[in-house]
Amino acid sequence: MSEREKSGDASAVRRIICISNLIKRNLDCARAQRDDTLTPMHGFIIGYINRNSGRDVFQKDIEKTFSYRRSTASTVLGLMEEKGLIERRPVEYDARLKKLVLTEKSKRFAASCEEDGRALDERIASWISEDERRELLRILDKIKTNLKGE
């Protein structure tokens, strides 16, 4: 076992956490220039709702898309509602359901949130080959699928 492996540098989990933190920091810097109340997760959710504007989006969709537990999704969406980023509106076909709708405030951020994510994704893609990118996405999807199944 090498010194790096002994010190924990070979840990995939630590590397993923580190990369996640660096991605969050990069996105925080970009969003803070527009509105310091936006978090990267808010931006991802705003982008998701915006991309799916042709259909009703519900909390369950956020839970599934971002692998959130119901309580986490409820908390995040509740904070977004308090900050005036989303509204929950009833749907005509089921009184129990409330669709998530972007407010005018978040609509102003939607394009820039999407652009921030796209720009960072392009920067990351520029550091690796297309084959490496496909393999990375394949491996990440495999890890996600297996973790969900446990």
Image (spheres, helix red, strand yellow):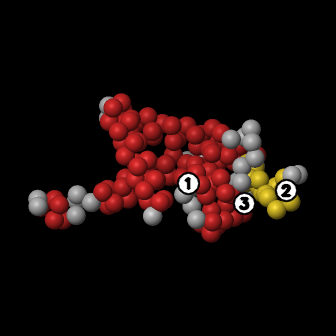
Earlier residue among tags 3 and 1: 1
Residue corresponding to mark 2 = 94
Label 2 SS: strand
Sequence order check, earlier mark of 2 and 1? 1
The furthest residue to the left: 2
Whether label 3 touches label 1, CB < 8 Å: no
Taking 123 as reference, is 85 above or below it?
Answer: below
Asked whether, in this view, residue 148 is left or right of residue 19, the answer is: right
- Mark 3 = which residue? 81
- Within-10-Å neighbours for mark 1: few <14, some 14–19, many 20+: few
Of residue 134 and residue 34, the one placed in the foreground of this image is: 134
Label 3: few (<14), some (14–19) or many (≥20) C-alpha neighbours in 10 Å: some
**Residue type marked 2:** Asp
Q: Secondary structure at mark 1?
A: helix
Using the rendered view, name the quadrant where residue 37 is placed. Answer: bottom right
Q: Is residue 96 left or right of residue 52?
A: right
User: Which numbered mark, 2 or 1, is in the foreground of this view?
Assistant: 2
Eyeballing the image, is 142 above or below 115?
below
Q: Residue at x 79, y 58 (%)?
A: 97
Q: Residue 123, image x and y in percent?
A: 40, 36
Residue 69 x %, y %: 58, 65
Residue 18 visible at all: no
Please tell me in which quadrant of the rendered image residue 16 appears: bottom left
Residue type at mark 1 is Phe
Residue pointed to by mark 1: 66
